Image: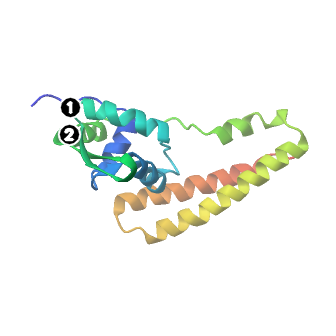
Amino acid sequence: MPAPPAVNATAAALLGLLHSGPMTGGQLVAAAGERFGSFFTVTRSQVYRELPVMAEAGLLRLGKQGPRASQQYVITAAGKRAFKAWLQHGSGGDALRSPLVLRLLHAGQLTVKQRAELVSTSREVYTARLAEARAASRNEEDPYRKAVADFTVAHTRAMVKLLDTVPLD
């Protein structure tokens, strides 16, 4: 059996979601936001760019035609092997990519009012996310999802703490 093609993180995210059954591009976008939107973003354009490439590579096959000409995709055996290979051969380290952290790094360029607005608005968002993350963590039974849910709580709590330390004057 030939080695499965290497996949990028976005393709791996989609393959992981498709393990639960066939989905359309729109369903994949929604599922990605729900399942791992707090730590890994997948945009609509990324999904629709990756799907045909993955189908051409034999990782997916076309499923049923849905409403309004939406197309379901089904993971193939090759797709499952490629996903498993991606899981096994991780690099171990990640880089944080946060537009908010980048903005805060340069917040000294803003006026006091602009900086206060950035921090206030961001704190509201992260406070709401923290409540959602805590609820998700409490309700998660799967040990792997629970570990990620706990990470999401800790990361979100750290973002709130960061916002609380930004000088506003």
Question: What's the CA distance linking mark 2 and mark 1?
Answer: 6 Å
The quadrant where residue 160 appears: bottom right
Q: Which residue is mark 2?
A: 81
The tag on residue 4 is 1
The quadrant where residue 133 appears: bottom right
The quadrant where residue 109 appears: top right
Helix, strand or loop under label 1? loop
Using the image, determine if residue 113 lies above or below residue 128: above
Residue that protrudes farthest toward the front in the picture: 68
* Residue 93 makes an appearance in the image: no
Percent x, y of residue 30: 46, 53
Percent x, y of residue 87: 30, 41
Using the image, determine if residue 69 lies above or below residue 21: above
- How busy is the neighbourhood of tag 2: few (under 14 within 10 Å), some, or many (20 plus)? some
Q: Quadrant of the N terminus?
A: top left
Q: Residue at x 89, y 46 (%)?
A: 113
Helix, strand or loop under label 2? helix
Q: Residue at x 60, y 59 (%)?
A: 129
Using the image, determine if residue 167 lies above or below residue 54: below
The tag on residue 115 is none
Closer to us: 41 or 140: 41
Tell me if 135 is positioned left or right of 130 in this view. left
